[in-house]
Image (cartoon, grey):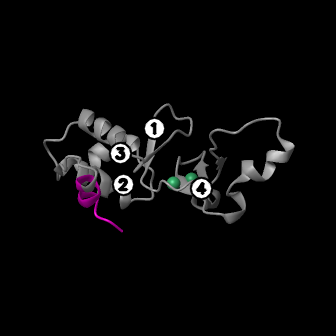
């Protein structure tokens, strides 16, 4: 995988420690954190970075298509550095957001197209339920 600094440089965009920190943090987590969580995680190592900068940086990466925004109905956005289309699971008990990389779910709207009197422009699939940890309780 390419280094984020290299990707930004090739696009002629400024490489800042904040941009690198935010992107790398998102690449190294499967938690789908929101801006506040990203901010709190990076605060100890990036004490001068503000929450506003985190929001601006996330928006910057979103515009570049390097990060996707995910809204599962919590009134705030979560972020994912995995920009390939994939469905998500949301635990209604603990709030955990997970990835579903299932071949059968890919291009669902395309597969259903003959039966749909609807032209799909955007596709998002979220399954709500209980995660394995919460089912044990
Ligand atoms: Zn759970
Ligand atoms: Mn994901």
Circle 1 Cα neighbour tier, 10 Å, few/some/many (<14 / 14–19 / ≥20): some
First reached walking from the N terminus: tag 1 or tag 4: 1
Circle 2 Cα neighbour tier, 10 Å, few/some/many (<14 / 14–19 / ≥20): some
Q: Position of residue 38 (x, y in %)?
A: 32, 46
The reply to whether dot 3 and dot 1 touch (C-beta < 8 Å) is no
Tell us which disc is closer to us: 2 or 4: 2
**Residue closer to the observer: 82 or 93:** 82
Q: From mark 1 to mark 4, how far is it between C-alphas?
A: 23 Å
Extreme bottom residue here? 1
Q: Is residue 77 left or right of residue 21?
A: right
Residue at the spot of label 2: 26
Q: Is residue 79 left or right of residue 9?
A: right
Q: From mark 3 to mark 4, how far is it between C-alphas?
A: 33 Å
First reached walking from the N terminus: tag 3 or tag 2: 2
Q: Is mark 1 within 8 Å of ligand 2?
A: no
Residue at the spot of label 1: 77
Q: Position of residue 5 (x, y in %)?
A: 23, 58
Q: Main secondary structure of the magenta part?
A: helix
Residue at the spot of label 4: 134
Residue at the spot of label 3: 61
**Residue closer to the observer: 49 or 121:** 121
Residue bounds of the magenta highlight = 1-9
The reply to whether dot 2 and dot 4 touch (C-beta < 8 Å) is no
Q: Which residue is drawn at the image coordinates 85% and 46% (left, top)? A: 114
Q: Is mark 3 within 8 Å of ligand 2?
A: no
| Rendered position, 60 above or below 1 | above
First reached walking from the N terminus: tag 3 or tag 1: 3
First reached walking from the N terminus: tag 3 or tag 4: 3
Residue 79 seen by the camera: yes
Q: Is mark 4 within 8 Å of ligand 1?
A: yes
Tell us which disc is closer to us: 3 or 2: 3
């Amino acid at each position: 995988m390419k280094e984020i600094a290299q990707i930004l440089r090739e696009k002629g965009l400024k490489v800042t420690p904040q941009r690198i920190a935010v992107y790398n943090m998102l690449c190294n987590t499967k938690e789908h954190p929101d801006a506040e969580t990203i901010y709190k995680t990076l605060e100890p190592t990036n004490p001068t970075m503000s929450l506003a900068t985190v929001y601006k940086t996330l928006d910057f990466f979103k515009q570049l298509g390097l990060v996707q925004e995910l809204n599962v109905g919590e009134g705030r956005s979560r972020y994912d550095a995995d920009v390939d289309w994939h469905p998500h699971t949301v635990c209604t008990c603990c709030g955990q957001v997970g990835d579903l990389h299932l071949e059968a779910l890919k291009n669902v709207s395309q597969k259903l197209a003959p039966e749909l009197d609807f032209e799909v422009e955007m596709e998002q699939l979220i399954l709500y339920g209980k995660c394995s940890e919460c089912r044990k309780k």
